[in-house]
Image: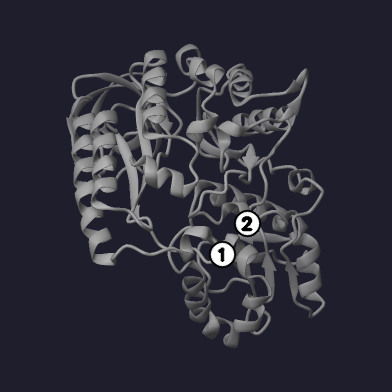
Amino acid sequence: MSAPRKLFIRTYGCQMNVYDSERMAEALGEQGYEQVDSPEGADMILLNTCHIREKAAEKVYSELGRFRGLKEAKPDLKIGVAGCVAQAEGEEIMRRAPLVDLVVGPQSYHRLPAMEARLREGGRAIDTDFPVEDKFTGLPPRPRASRGPTAFLTVQEGCDKFCAFCVVPYTRGAEASRPPERILAEARDLVARGVREITLLGQNVNAYHGAGEGGDWSLARLIRALAGVDGLERIRYTTSHPNDMSDDLIAAHGECDKLMPYLHLPVQSGSDRILKRMNRSHSAESYLRLIERIRAARPDILISGDFIVGFPEESDADFRATLDLVEAVGYGQAYSFCYSPRPGTPAAERAQVDPAVAAERLQRLQALLGQQQKRAQDRMVGQEVGVLFEKPGREAGQMVGKSDHLHAVHVNGGGVGPGVLARVRIVASGANSLAGEVIAAE
């Protein structure tokens, strides 16, 4: 029997890319590849790219340049680019980087085995189509190897919102949802291999509308069905759009014990003028009223958000409105960035804010968000929380896991290991984590 070929995958960006990388590794596993942790000695290198950050394509070309020496030393080494940059750049990658053998978009990676066979025949392969067939049905069954206690599960892809700053509709395509029975089957399989917490993924995950028994299912109905899976203890979902927070999903937060009290709900700006220019289709007031309804259903929920600072034409008054909204909401966690243009998006053609002004605004926003995050963590001291432990910590005998509210929690001792779900009393709040003592473990 021939030795397995070695596959190295470097993943950039969102959780969906993490999931996609897992599935690509599984597809190539059927072709005799095993995944390794280093590009040195690999037979194939795949960069699973993200187009969200500034100059994403240039960073990919820079990374490819670092592999030139490996390719020269091992001419049979195959190098591929996958993900959203692959979708956006396509043939340009092949032209600018001759060492690349394979380019595959995020909707076509189920075709990787056939593309890899083409490489072994001496050719190059590119596929950036939006295939008619569902890529998930073309993937091999997931291997039966054991898993860690947490996993991502993609349920929805693509976006129909066309925010003025975003490339996702162009790189991931229109909104599409997987059938619920396939999601439930994959969830049961993950649980059978040791998973206790699943995070449902989608570009607009709460726009989920998979065709199932009785018609299209909402995300709330899917969550309630997943809650019936024996052995699945925790359910999360990300990322959501305010326009798709339906009444039944809000109700699920108050009624479904397995749905964790954490919600990432990006708003992007607190200025109605900027929200309109972003094509966000919601107002600051409608977002605040939505937060009120969610907290009425689940009072202890931790709200997380996304913010873009320095969006084209943003004035001091627009930025002040964002600070006002942040003060009104009180975020437990948030992600904030300076706007950077994405080629081909409407906002890229507009008058840009002075980078120095945008950077100063970002510092002010992050200082406020940091204060709110610290207050949220400090409030946890003295409380009992559920913690699903995932891995050893930095110190001997220390274990680290995530609380119900997605805070990182570490304990010393307590007799817990990976996969254990325990009640923990929080005793201290650090910069980005909580310290706790185990009260009771399963």
In this rendering, the answer to whether 320 lies above or below 355 is: above
Q: CA distance from mark 2 to mark 1?
A: 9 Å
In this rendering, the answer to whether 46 lies above or below 407 is: below
Q: Nearer the viewer, residue 60 or 4?
A: 60
Q: Which residue is mark 2?
A: 170
Q: Is residue 10 left or right of residue 121?
A: left
Q: Are marks 2 and 1 in contact (CB under 8 Å)?
A: yes
Q: How many marks?
A: 2
The kind of residue tagged 1 is: Gly
Q: Which residue is mark 1?
A: 344
Q: Nearer the viewer, mark 2 or mark 1?
A: 1
Q: Which residue is depicted at the point 71% across and 57% down?
A: 109
Note whether residue 50 is visible: no
Residue 192 found in image quarter: top right
Where residue 232 sits: x, y (%)?
55, 24
* Residue at disc 1, secondary structure: loop
Badge 2 local density, few (<14 within 10 Å), some, or many (20+)? some
Q: Nearer the viewer, residue 80 or 243?
A: 243
Where residue 143 sits: x, y (%)?
69, 44
